[in-house]
């Protein structure tokens, strides 16, 4: 897991980096809030340790800007003890707060706790089946790691099938679950959407490997 450490105290950054790298983490560092915003755009970053008082851009402003494009967990560091700083940090999107000086063991414990929690959340919202991955929270779809643009109904169809592998759904069931009563009489709607999904997700849409047809019954996702 890649962790981002942003602090203008060189010795502190070296100490934190050394300890985290010994735990098996990959560490990337920066010295100001502008670094934090830039480096946080890396999709492999799983957690940010961010100092409040820094040059160029302070940690609170950096936290606010990061939250405009990312939900990666942020632990704020500060030499101050005023409650207002902590409240501002949480208002701007921080997940945790640690006041300097702190014990490195406490920081590592908090990092482990946050990463366990986020890993559990990701497991509930993200599902991977072979070359296809879905994120139900962001409603993004990926094929071999590359984003694929699905319509809302296409995504709903794929999510239903991929979360229930090898379960065959009749066209009537899919109409009822995905579209509701409005489309109950137009069974061709399902066929059209399945065809479009295969064109976007299958390597060879004419010979699909994942979204298959059970002749005379309906469709299913093969693991």
Image: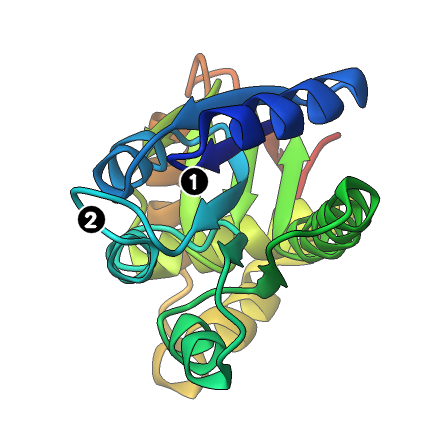
Is residue 215 shown to the viewer in this render?
A: no
Name the N-terminal-most of marks 1 and 2: 2
Q: Residue at x 27, y 41 (%)?
A: 37
Query: 76 or 41: which is nearer to us?
Result: 76
Is residue 63 shown to the viewer in this render?
A: yes
| Horizontal side of residue 111 vs 29, given as left or right | right
Quarter assignment of residue 2: top right
Image position, residue 185 (x, y; %):
39, 76
* Relative to 85, residue 33 above or below: above
Q: Residue at x 42, y 21 (%)?
A: 205
Query: 3 or 98: which is nearer to us?
Result: 98
Image position, residue 89 (x, y; %):
42, 71
Image position, residue 5 (x, y; %):
49, 34
Residue indicated by mark 1: 141
Q: Residue at x 65, y 52 (%)?
A: 101
Q: Residues within 10 Å of mark 1 (few under 14, many from 20)?
A: many
Residue indicated by mark 2: 57
Q: Residue at x 76, y 41 (%)?
A: 104
| Horizontal side of residue 132 vs 56, given as left or right | right
Q: Are marks 1 and 2 in contact (CB under 8 Å)?
A: no
Query: 43 or 61: which is nearer to us?
Result: 61
Q: Residues within 10 Å of mark 2 (few under 14, many from 20)?
A: some
Disc 2, SS = loop
Quarter assignment of residue 16: top right
> Which one is closest to the eye, mark 1 or mark 2?
2
């Amino acid at each position: 897991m890649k962790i981002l450490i942003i602090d203008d105290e060189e010795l502190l950054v070296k100490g934190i980096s050394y300890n985290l790298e010994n735990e098996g983490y990959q560490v990337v560092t920066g010295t100001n809030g502008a670094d934090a915003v830039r480096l946080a755009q890396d999709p492999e970053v799983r957690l940010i340790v961010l100092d409040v008082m820094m040059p160029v851009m302070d940690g609170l402003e950096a936290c606010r800007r990061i939250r405009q494009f990312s939900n990666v967990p942020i632990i704020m560091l500060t030499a101050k003890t005023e409650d207002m700083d902590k409240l501002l940090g949480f208002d701007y999107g921080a997940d945790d707060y640690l006041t300097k000086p702190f014990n490195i063991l406490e920081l590592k414990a908090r990092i482990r706790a946050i990463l366990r929690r986020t890993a559990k959340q990701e497991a509930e919202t993200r599902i991977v089946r072979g070359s296809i991955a879905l994120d139900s929270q962001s409603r993004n779809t990926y094929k071999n790691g590359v984003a694929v643009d699905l319509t809302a109904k296409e995504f709903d169809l794929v999510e239903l099938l991929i979360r229930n592998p090898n379960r065959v759904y009749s066209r009537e069931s899919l109409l009822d679950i995905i579209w509701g009563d409005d489309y109950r009489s137009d069974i061709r709607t399902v066929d059209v959407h399945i065809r479009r999904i295969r064109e976007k997700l299958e390597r060879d849409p004419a010979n699909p490997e994942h979204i298959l047809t059970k002749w005379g019954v309906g469709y299913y996702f093969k693991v």
